[in-house]
Amino acid sequence: MNKQSTVAVVSVKDSVQETVRVAMELADWQKYVEKGKPTALKVNLGWDLFIPGSITSPWVVEGVIQTIRDWTGPLCIVESDQVLENIEKAFRKARLRELCDRYGIQWINMTHVKQVSVPVPNGKIFQTLELPETLLQNQVITIPVMKTHAKTKITGAIKNQWGCISKMRHNYHLVLDDALADINSVVRPVFAVMDATIALEGNGPKSGNPKVVNRILASHDIVAIDTAQAKLMGIDPATVVHLGTCASRCLGTNSLDQIEWKGDPDAKELNLHFKTAKHNLVSRVEEILRRSSLRKIVFHTPLFSLMLWGAKIWYLIWFYFVNGTKLWKRTLDLPMYGKEWKHVKGDSAN
């Protein structure tokens, strides 16, 4: 019989931070996180003009910090730039600077540190990867958000490592499933804690709709936790290509029969009926152009800068005049999480 991977799914009752601790303990985090070793917390800050559910919430990050800080060596929070986003701005707006100051933790924008060439074993897309030296000096705990994704159906613990490589990573969008397997075969997070307090459904990973799930997931197996995520969302894990690709590379299990569920007794049977993602205008135009004979002109000449401005304008219009501000208001009115996100929202002008 194949060894099972544990995935803990725990509902938030009162304290998110305490729920994080409980979920991590149910998933036996101390077996996988080496004592005394420097540790990088890979968060998701994929949008500086964010809505709740599109980035890792600070209270989940704080829960991880509180749980492990007396066990590990020095901690740092890490993320990388994107061509469309200002990650430094997202870091400040998400109130993660306050966490770093409170707990004496270093913030590292991995785009600005030394890059090291690392061979990719049996790489399909990359034979070598230029990775931030930080990732080679630290064990990695990945802290993704439960979201739908127009290109990969879901984004979770596996996809969160997409932010570990160059901001020009968008050039690999058409081969994303194999690229994700290549990256995770090298980065190899030792543990994953998934923020499913407020998730994102619909047209993720940015322009979707916040959905209160009120749960924390934890596992040492990044494929298993994403497989459980898909199951909870009501998405057949077998239809999520990168789960099978990563499992075939021995990065974890995508078989529900090989997952041991802990925590909420009903988690294994739960179906949260997430609305799936479709391409928004930006994503659709990008995909069409990448498959066309114009791709070299559009993506490898100064014309690309104009495309970026067009995409930024679209997201600004969507945020301020279509759905973004409405979704923020709806979140702030929630009896649970409204107060926390109101604190975050208070810094939105900076």
Image (cartoon, grey):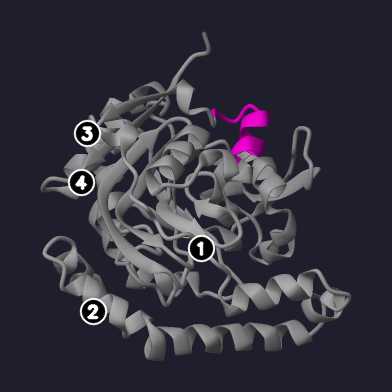
Depth check, front residue: 38 or 122: 122
Residue appearing at x 66%, y 41% in the figure: 181
Residue appearing at x 75%, y 33% in the figure: 121
Q: CA distance from mark 4 to mark 3?
A: 9 Å
Q: CA distance from mark 3 to mark 2?
A: 31 Å
Mark on residue 277?
Answer: 1
Q: Residue 230's x, y, as percent?
A: 45, 44
Mark 2 — residue? 329
Q: CA distance from mark 1 to mark 4?
A: 29 Å
Q: Residue furthest top?
A: 1
Mark 3 — residue? 22
Give, as a single range, the part of the protein colored magenta: 243-253
Residue appearing at x 45%, y 18% in the figure: 4
Magenta residue check for 244: yes
Mark on residue 17?
Answer: 4
Q: Secondary structure at mark 4?
A: helix
**Can you tell which quarter of the image residue 172 is in?**
bottom right
Which badge, 4 or 2, is on the more N-terminal residue? Answer: 4
Magenta residue check for 99: no
Which badge, 3 or 2, is on the more N-terminal residue? Answer: 3
Three-letter code, disc 1: Ala
Depth check, front residue: 108 or 175: 175
Three-letter code, disc 3: Val
